[in-house]
Amino acid sequence: MTDIQHDDRRQGGRRWRLVRWGGAALLLLAPAVAMPFTAEVNWGPADFALFAAMLVTACAAYEVALRITTARAWRTAIALAIAAAFLLTWAHLAVGLF
């Protein structure tokens, strides 16, 4: 019985991994979709490459955190730290706030 529960938990983890990486891919596609409709979004290849590198780094860091700890509180804290670092870096690169 424990094997069945373990397999269900792993299957759920695979679904969440797909959601995380799929969400990152959708975030990367958002500027590409917006560019034909507005002149305010004007990204070049370097912008897409840098944003892709940031997304891969953030998702990979969270994947490592998931393997290190099983405590939900720690996972939440790590996710918030990664999100804060991502957003601060993005804001700095976008408009140079810091």
Image (cartoon, rainbow, N blue to C red):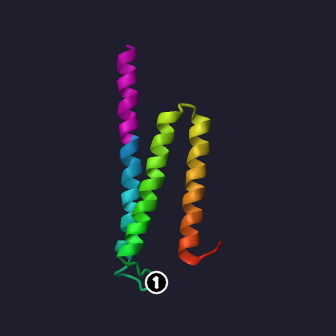
Is 85 situated above or below 90?
above
The residue lying at 41 percent from left, 73 percent from top is 47
The residue lying at 53 percent from left, 75 percent from top is 94
Residue 23 image-quadrant placement: bottom left
Residue 4 magenta-highlighted:
yes
Seen from this angle, which residue lies furthest top? 1
Seen from this angle, which residue lies furthest right? 98
Residue 30 lies left or right of residue 89; in this view the side is: left
Element carrying mark 1: loop
Residue 32 image-quadrant placement: bottom left
Mark 1 is on which residue type?
Answer: Glu
The residue lying at 38 percent from left, 68 percent from top is 49
- Classify mark 1: residues with Cα within 10 Å, few (<14), some (14-19) or many (20+): few
Residue 11 magenta-highlighted:
yes
Is 89 situated above or below 16?
below
Residue 55 lies left or right of residue 98; in this view the side is: left
State which quarter of the image contains the N terminus. Answer: top left
Residue 67 lies left or right of residue 32; in this view the side is: right
Q: How many marks?
A: 1
Q: Position of residue 37 (x, y in %)?
A: 37, 81
Is 57 situated above or below 66?
below
Q: Which residues are magenta?
A: 1-15
Q: Position of residue 30 (x, y in %)?
A: 39, 68
Q: Position of residue 42 (x, y in %)?
A: 41, 82
Front residue of this view, candidates 92 and 6: 92
Magenta stretch: dominant secondary structure: helix
State which quarter of the image contains the C terminus. Answer: bottom right
Mark 1 = which residue? 40
